[in-house]
Amino acid sequence: MPLLVIHTPTKSCENIILLEQNPIANSTLSLRACTLFVPTNEAFQRHHDTTYVLYHMATVAMTQDQLTKTIPSDMDGNPPLYITKNRNGDIYVNNARIIPSLSVEMTNNDGKRQVMHIIDEVLVPLTSLPTSKTEITNPDAFQFLQQADLLNIGENRLRSYRSQVTVMRKENLYQSPGGHTFLIPVDEGFKQTTRSSLVDNKVIDGHVILNNVIFTSAAQIEVPQTTAAFEDNIKVTVSFSKQKEGKMYVKSNTLLGDSKHATGVVLAEIVKANIPVRNGVVHLIHRPLMIIDTTVTQFLQVSQQYLNT
């Protein structure tokens, strides 16, 4: 397939970015205002899957200062791109950092304003499995849970947690409009048979950070975030940690509990991060949070492994 070659000047040399040619993208570049997020060559070299060109485009021109919290992409279903602006000045689109010195503003032959931002990762949308007969576009977090077996999320299965969300009638939490962070334990984390029965309303609430879309690259490390389980009779926070080997963890801290929810910390590895959905981002974790069902020795072993990675 022929390639669209975009040349972007750097301080010392010309940086060549390759994108698959796409007739819709070419039409947009020729005729419309747009914002284009272009990964670096290094980002393309690290990325071994399909590149979705239209997920890197929006049909409104925005400089770094003009970027809003969400921007509808030009991909089918217009799944949103999430913008995070950190206190240190870094700007992220989903999990990719914008390289500030390389943004370019221009006009096309029709005088339409266009802005190009260079980013350090390829943007990865949520897509259906190639074998799926059902095309799923721009699902919310509950649709993601319902249809996870048809989605391209690797070998991860979510049936145990999905079942508990249904039993506890917490669908509305996952359908909430806006932008939230959803931590979803995979089936592997329910091998201890009692864990499923311990996932009640409050535990499910403790897996959702409301009104805050947190991708791992943009996450504030070791900063507690209040969860939906933060009220008069129970208070649970979640924080993100990144280790030397690149592994990411989340840690729940039940500050105030009750007879069913013990105070204390639970650590879970993120096994698949940064899955964008219509109402935020999903991170798949290796075990449920808030459920303190390991011995002190087991917890210390896991903690030591966490500290040594």
Image: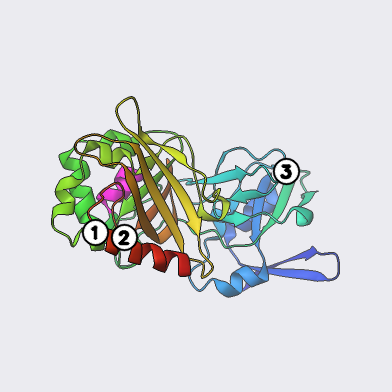
Residue 202 in the image: above or below residue 81: above
Element at label 1: loop
Q: Which residue is mark 1?
A: 295
Check the image and tell me how it is coloured: rainbow
Q: Residue 63 has which mark? A: 3
Is 125 displayed left or right of 100 in the figure? left
Find the magenta span and give its range: 141-147
Labels 3, 2: front one: 2
Mark 2: which amino acid? Phe
Residue 128 image label: none
Tell me the kind of residue under disc 3: Thr
**Could you tell me if residue 129 is visible in this image?**
no
Residue that mark 2 sits on: 299
Q: Nearer the viewer, mark 1 or mark 3?
A: 1
Asked whether residue 167 is drawn in magenta, I would say: no
Query: In the rendered structure, which amino acid carries the disc numbered 1?
Result: Thr
